[in-house]
């Protein structure tokens, strides 16, 4: 039985197979419409979520399966003090597979050690969000045709953004990847990512402060939110915040085939006037999240479609 706690749980070969399956699901949804009939997905969400929970539920329903679960800790026996270990033992009696989001890092891993069904980490604190990373990889491969030979700009909150950290870990396994890290000094990528991941693996990168200085060389621009609460004082926030609002003027400096991604939700870091640009991929990215979660459910349940 296989679980998914981190994108690195999958080898590059397993990952490519999963993404190929997701692309086939996109092209032939009817082929998979009854693949999980009689199977149940439990969504155990100890903190609120829109995209992740609903995309997991949509994925299972698209496969002909059914869904049960809870959307907040307050609506589960966690409110009575039940442990994650006990909860997953009970859920294992009711469902065939479980997607778990938890505010505590490592909670889904603890669940997986006690579970008799596959467990998917749907986000654990600031630690991992593997299915978002799988979504990002599928989006890149589908729209760019490859996961190698790319210059990727990561923009905004690179210090606290778990999606950014997971994506770096996943992409360095492919050849000829380089990163442009675009952030204010206060929100630069953590030193362990810089030293233990990028430099240790000889991955080229540069760090810049202004989006305009880098956008022209990028194949992919991955936007994240710069949040006011991350700054020590209001003056620094006001000084920096407009650097990281992507608008039509900045898009005019970019390559014609660059794609813009964002894990969502956005606040004001991408102007709505960019939404109609064919390079804006963030809503398509959300759709790819359903396909990749469908492929993951099929893979972990070992369902084969002829």
Image (spheres, rainbow, N blue to C red):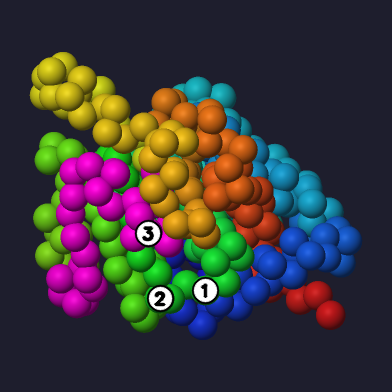
Give the vertical position of 66 relative to 266 (above or below). below
Q: Residue at x 19, y 77 (%)?
A: 202
| Residue that badge 1 annotates | 146
Give the vertical position of 298 relative to 175 (above or below). above
Over which residues does the magenta segment extend? 198-223
N-term mark: 2 or 3: 2
Q: Is residue 188 left or right of residue 107?
A: left
Q: Residue at x 51, y 56 (%)?
A: 256
Please name which of the two marks, 2 or 3, marks the residue nearer to the observer: 3
Q: Residue at x 69, y 44 (%)?
A: 57
Is there CB contact under 8 Å for labels 2 and 1?
A: yes
Circle on res. 149: 2
Please check the rendered image and state whether residue 171 is part of the magenta-colored stretch, yes or no.
no
Q: Position of residue 44 (x, y in %)?
A: 55, 41
Q: Position of residue 145 (x, y in %)?
A: 57, 72
Q: Residue at x 42, y 26 (%)?
A: 268
Q: Is residue 36 left or right of residue 279?
A: right
| Residue that badge 3 annotates | 218
Give the CA distance from mark 2 to mark 1: 8 Å
Q: Position of residue 67 (x, y in %)?
A: 73, 43
Q: Position of residue 35 (x, y in %)?
A: 82, 64
Element type at mark 1 = loop
Residue 180 visible at all:
yes
């Amino acid at each position: 039985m296989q679980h998914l706690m981190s994108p690195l749980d999958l080898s590059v070969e397993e990952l490519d197979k999963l993404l190929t399956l997701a692309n086939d699901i996109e092209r032939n949804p009817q082929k998979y419409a009854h693949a999980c009939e009689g199977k149940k997905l439990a969504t155990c969400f100890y903190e609120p979520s829109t995209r992740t929970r609903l995309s997991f539920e949509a994925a299972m329903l698209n496969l002909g399966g059914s869904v049960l679960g809870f959307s907040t800790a307050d609506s589960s026996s966690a409110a009575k003090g039940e442990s994650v270990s006990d909860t997953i033992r009970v859920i294992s009696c009711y469902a065939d597979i479980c997607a778990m989001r938890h505010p505590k890092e490592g909670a889904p891993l603890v669940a997986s050690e006690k579970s008799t069904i596959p467990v998917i980490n749907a986000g654990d604190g600031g630690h991992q969000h593997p299915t978002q990373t799988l979504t990002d990889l599928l989006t890149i491969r589908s729209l760019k045709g490859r996961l190698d030979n790319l210059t990727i700009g990561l923009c905004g909150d690179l210090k606290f953004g778990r999606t950014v950290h997971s994506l770096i870990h996943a992409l360095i396994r492919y050849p000829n990847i380089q990163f442009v890290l675009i952030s204010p000094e206060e929100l630069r990528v953590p030193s362990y990512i810089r030293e233990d991941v990028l430099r240790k693996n000889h991955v080229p990168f540069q760090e810049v402060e202004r989006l305009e200085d880098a956008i022209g060389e990028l194949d992919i621009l991955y936007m994240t939110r710069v949040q006011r609460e991350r700054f020590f004082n209001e003056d620094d926030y006001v000084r920096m915040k407009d650097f990281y609002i992507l608008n039509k003027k900045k898009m005019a400096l970019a390559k014609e085939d660059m794609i813009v991604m964002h894990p969502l939700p956005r606040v004001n870091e991408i102007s709505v006037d960019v939404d109609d640009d064919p390079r804006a991929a963030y809503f398509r990215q959300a759709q790819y999240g359903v396909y990749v979660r469908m492929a993951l459910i099929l893979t972990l349940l070992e369902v084969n479609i002829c």
